[in-house]
Image (spheres, rainbow, N blue to C red):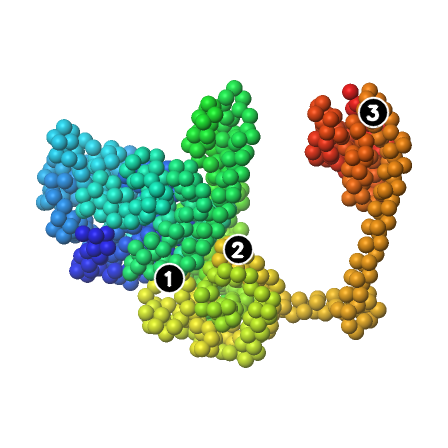
């Protein structure tokens, strides 16, 4: 079976068992503060396990794109080294939300593996949870008894809490699990060692492929376990591992999931795969990493220097380093794998082939940038002087942190010079950075405390900005030394930060409306609307008034609706290739990132502004459609954003059926006239193929035009009420240029006069010609020209000039080449002399300058100059 056939067989099997097949959630997580990336198939269903969202389908199956490169689940350093770890991987999963449980999950997993995929039963081992006395958890006898119906008891093994009790993190949904392992060794190897002894022992040919998790508990902050509202099944089967087993390979990388890319890399590098372990690892790393890089970019996360963007940049640079060091790719190459990858996933994850050109150009730009950095780092290493032939750990860490060098590359370069690397020092520096990073981002989140009978929270903010409600639950959160509280309301008009729109602020008033607490922010967490406050109400029970800050909301809506008009105008002016790549919408301004591979010209920006303002003046009424079937919306020609998770039913926002129609969960104006006016204030590059426009609307745009008018009036007054400002300013510029030329001519004449005067006042000391003089020139360039002229005229020159330009003292030191060879250094001398004027400076061995704050020290500088002559 091919990889595509294997994937489809899984989905079809569970579809036959009445499972609803759902699409993969984006790999980049947007509404869960505990995660940057989807690292397990269950992430998108976490709110269902916790009972915080309505269950649409009690049985679900999917293949989920996952990424594991940080935190608890971190496989990065194993990728490419072993046969089965990956950064991005597919997790095949079937789910039950309060429907079936262990009996069906176990029966169906056995049926699929042995009857559909035809894996020999004797190759399979299963595990069950042995219990944990400390936790008060009993042995999972039910799972053991169920497995006995299908599996020989010698192949049913107990597992401890580490291996057979699945937890998402320190807190959250969890439960006992039952793993399925495959022994892929040869018959000869099996005869020597019993496969049962190799389960969960990291043997490369005895691997886990499927985990059936029986979600029963929620881990609380204090470590205790609380029963979930209902029992669920959460299974995950590693697609790449399954393909390897079914295609009878000894490595995931030998399957048709990776081999097309690996063979392409081998062909282009001229190095045969399988010829050398180091080059093989490099090819595997590249084939693996390009998958993670491409899907993250396609989901809307661009490489950057922080958070999720930094993680993907780090993965990309890791791939480029391997290509550069071991495969001799000195020019950008990684991007050439993108079309191959897009073709491979056509019909599975269409977002990659839809954005192939964009993703490839982003990867190319990152490669070009990093190869320059890599070259700089190599030059830095070549200039490094190792003490006792040992590269300091701090320097090795600097190469890694600043220039992206992996420690093995630094070790390789060190060995070529006969040096070693202080690995202990390197590890200490690395640990310190990780500790500092964790400390800076550490968040201490308490457990939810239920106030009223828990029901699903409902957002009513599309229609109401004030509503009577109750507090369902709250918890305490500490971050960066600040203590806050998070509150969940039964009904809320507060819009939670999402889709680029900031969260609402406002007040939570008690029922008497005499006392209140401020709502400082509103965010989403797994579909739950969470309100932030610095203090809690005195009495948490009873009724409250939730009141949104209307002024802020209205201004935010102006900017949000304007982004929709802007998006449509950009497509109209620049082309249909334009797609939103990010946005920020608040009460003050809007920021809109979009795909486009050239600077937007002033003429194009003006045209875009005109179109948006025309639509504003037309006062187009908002057409809002809620709960539209997703497929119906797509077929209507609506604009959907890559990287967004859409449900079966969506909300459509339309301003003119033939102009702007988008899927959006944000809040909007009732008619475009409310926006008032629209003004673009900047256009810039964000990344390869991504531009950014910042703009203002409503009262901010009005104030902008008032400020411009005021500035124009002031300018007119300065130009004596000129009616033609352009002509007047041009005349001033022309006059200024003419005066500059005259000053330059005068300065040149002054320098020529001075150099001939100064030559006659040279003092000879120990065979060295000293010039120490205060120069009355008001241009640093003129002083420099004078110094260089004298260097050409006087042998063995030791020159010290002092100057005072615009009230600021300065020092210039010039040495002849002969004196530099004797060991004198202008840079060192000027730094020492600079102390006299409370300043500092530097430069080259033969020429250096310094500036300072104390002009009274200039006299001492000239007196001290002679002391530097040997």
x, y percent for residue 227: 29, 48
> CA separation, marks 1 and 2?
21 Å
Image height check: is 164 above or below 867?
A: below
Residue 221 visible here: no
User: Disc 2 vs disc 3: Cβ atoms closer than 8 Å?
Assistant: no
Give the residue pinned by disc 3: 866
- Viewer-proximal residue, 575 or 617? 575
Residue highlighted by disc 1: 354
Say if mark 1 contacts mark 3, CB within 8 Å. Answer: no
Residue 348 visible: yes
Q: Residue at x 49, y 44 (%)?
A: 370
Q: Residue at x 25, y 60 (%)?
A: 21
**Circle 1: is it few (<14), some (14-19), or many (20+) Cα within 10 Å?**
some
Residue that carries the numbered disc 2 in the rendered image:
686
User: Closest to the observer: 635 or 38?
Assistant: 635
Question: Does dot 1 land on a helix, a strand or a loop?
Answer: helix
Residue 140, image quadrant: top left
Label 2 vs label 3: CA separation?
A: 54 Å
Quadrant of residue 775 within the rendered picture:
top right
Q: Quadrant of the C terminus?
A: top right
């Amino acid at each position: 079976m091919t990889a595509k056939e294997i994937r489809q067989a899984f989905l079809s099997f569970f579809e036959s068992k009445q499972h609803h097949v759902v699409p993969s959630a984006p790999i980049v997580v947007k509404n869960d503060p505990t995660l940057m990336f989807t690292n397990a198939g269950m992430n998108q269903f976490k709110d269902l396990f916790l009972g915080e969202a309505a269950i649409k389908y009690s049985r679900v199956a999917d293949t989920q794109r996952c990424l594991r490169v940080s935190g608890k689940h971190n496989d990065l350093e194993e990728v490419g080294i072993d046969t089965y770890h990956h950064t991005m991987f597919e997790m095949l999963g079937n789910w039950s939300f309060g429907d079936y449980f262990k009996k069906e999950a176990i029966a169906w997993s056995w049926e699929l593996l042995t009857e559909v995929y035809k894996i020999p039963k004797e190759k399979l081992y299963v595990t069950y949870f042995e219990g944990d006395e400390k936790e008060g958890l009993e042995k999972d006898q039910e799972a053991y008894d169920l497995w006995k119906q299908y599996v020989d008891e010698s192949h049913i093994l107990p597992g401890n809490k580490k291996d057979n009790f699945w937890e998402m993190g320190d807190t959250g949904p969890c439960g006992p699990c039952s793993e399925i392992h495959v022994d892929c060794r040869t018959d000869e190897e099996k005869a020597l060692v019993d496969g049962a002894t190799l389960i969960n022992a990291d043997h490369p040919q005895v691997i886990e492929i499927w985990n059936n998790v029986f979600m029963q508990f929620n881990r609380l902050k204090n470590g205790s376990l609380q029963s979930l509202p209902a029992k669920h099944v959460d299974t995950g089967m590693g697609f790449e591992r399954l393909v390897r087993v079914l295609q009878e390979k000894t490595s995931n990388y030998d399957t048709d999931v990776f081999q097309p890319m690996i063979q392409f890399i081998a062909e282009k590098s001229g190095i045969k795969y399988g010829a050398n372990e180091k080059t093989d690892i490099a090819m595997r790393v590249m084939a693996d990493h390009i998958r993670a890089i491409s899907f993250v970019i396609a989901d809307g996360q661009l490489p950057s220097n922080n958070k999720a963007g930094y993680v993907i940049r780090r993965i990309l640079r890791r791939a480029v380093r391997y290509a550069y060091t071991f495969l001799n790719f000195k020019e950008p190459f990684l991007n050439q794998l993108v079309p191959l990858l897009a073709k491979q996933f056509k019909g599975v994850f269409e977002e990659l082939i839809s954005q192939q050109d964009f993703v490839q150009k982003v990867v190319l730009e990152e490669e070009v940038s990093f190869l320059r950095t890599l070259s700089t780092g190599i030059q830095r290493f070549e200039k490094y002087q190792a003490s006792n032939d040992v590269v300091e750990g701090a320097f090795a860490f600097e190469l890694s942190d600043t220039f992206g060098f992996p420690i093995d590359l630094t070790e390789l370069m060190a060995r070529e010079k006969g040096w070693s690397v202080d690995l202990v020092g390197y590890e200490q520096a690395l640990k310190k950075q990780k500790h500092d990073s964790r400390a800076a981002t550490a968040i201490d989140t308490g457990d939810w405390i239920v106030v009223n009978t828990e029901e699903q929270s409902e957002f009513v903010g599309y229609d109401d900005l004030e509503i009577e409600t109750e507090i369902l639950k709250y918890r305490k959160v500490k971050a960066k030394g600040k203590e806050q509280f998070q509150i969940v309301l039964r009904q809320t008009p507060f819009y939670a930060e999402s889709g680029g729109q900031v969260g609402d602020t406002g007040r939570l008033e008690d029922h008497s409306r005499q006392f209140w607490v401020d709502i400082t922010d509103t965010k989403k967490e797994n579909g739950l609307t969470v309100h932030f406050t610095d203090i809690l109400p005195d009495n948490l029970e009873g009724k409250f008034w939730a009141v949104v800050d209307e002024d802020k909301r209205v201004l935010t809506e102006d900017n949000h609706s304007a982004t929709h008009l802007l998006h449509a105008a950009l497509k109209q002016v620049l082309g249909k290739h334009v797609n939103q790549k990010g946005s920020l919408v608040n009460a003050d301004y809007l920021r809109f990132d979009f795909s486009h591979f050239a600077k937007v010209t002033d003429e194009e920006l003006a045209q875009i502004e005109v179109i948006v303002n025309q639509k504003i003046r037309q006062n187009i009424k908002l057409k809002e459609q809620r709960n539209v079937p997703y497929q119906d919306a797509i077929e209507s020609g609506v604009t959907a954003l890559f990287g967004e998770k859409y449900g079966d039913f969506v909300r459509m926002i339309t301003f003119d059926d033939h102009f702007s129609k988008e899927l959006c969960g944000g809040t909007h104006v009732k008619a475009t006239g409310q926006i008032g006016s629209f003004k673009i204030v900047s256009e810039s590059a964000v990344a390869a193929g991504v531009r950014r426009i910042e703009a203002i609307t409503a009262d901010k745009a009005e104030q902008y035009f008032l400020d411009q008018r005021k500035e124009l009036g002031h300018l007119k007054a300065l130009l004596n009420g000129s009616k033609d400002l352009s002509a007047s300013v041009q005349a001033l510029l022309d006059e200024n240029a003419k005066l500059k030329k005259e000053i330059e001519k005068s300065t040149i004449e002054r320098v020529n006069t001075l150099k001939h005067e100064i030559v006659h006042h040279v003092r000879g000391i120990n065979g060295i010609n000293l010039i120490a003089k205060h120069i009355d020139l008001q241009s640093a360039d003129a002083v420099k020209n004078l110094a260089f002229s004298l260097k050409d005229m006087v042998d063995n020159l030791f020159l010290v000039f002092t100057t005072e330009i615009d009230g600021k003292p300065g020092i210039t030191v010039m040495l002849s080449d002969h004196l530099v060879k004797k060991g004198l250094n202008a840079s060192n001398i000027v730094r020492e002399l600079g102390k006299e004027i409370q300043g500092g400076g530097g430069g080259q061995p033969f020429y250096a300058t310094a500036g300072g704050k104390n002009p009274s020290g200039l006299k001492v500088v000239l007196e001290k100059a002679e002391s530097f002559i040997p």
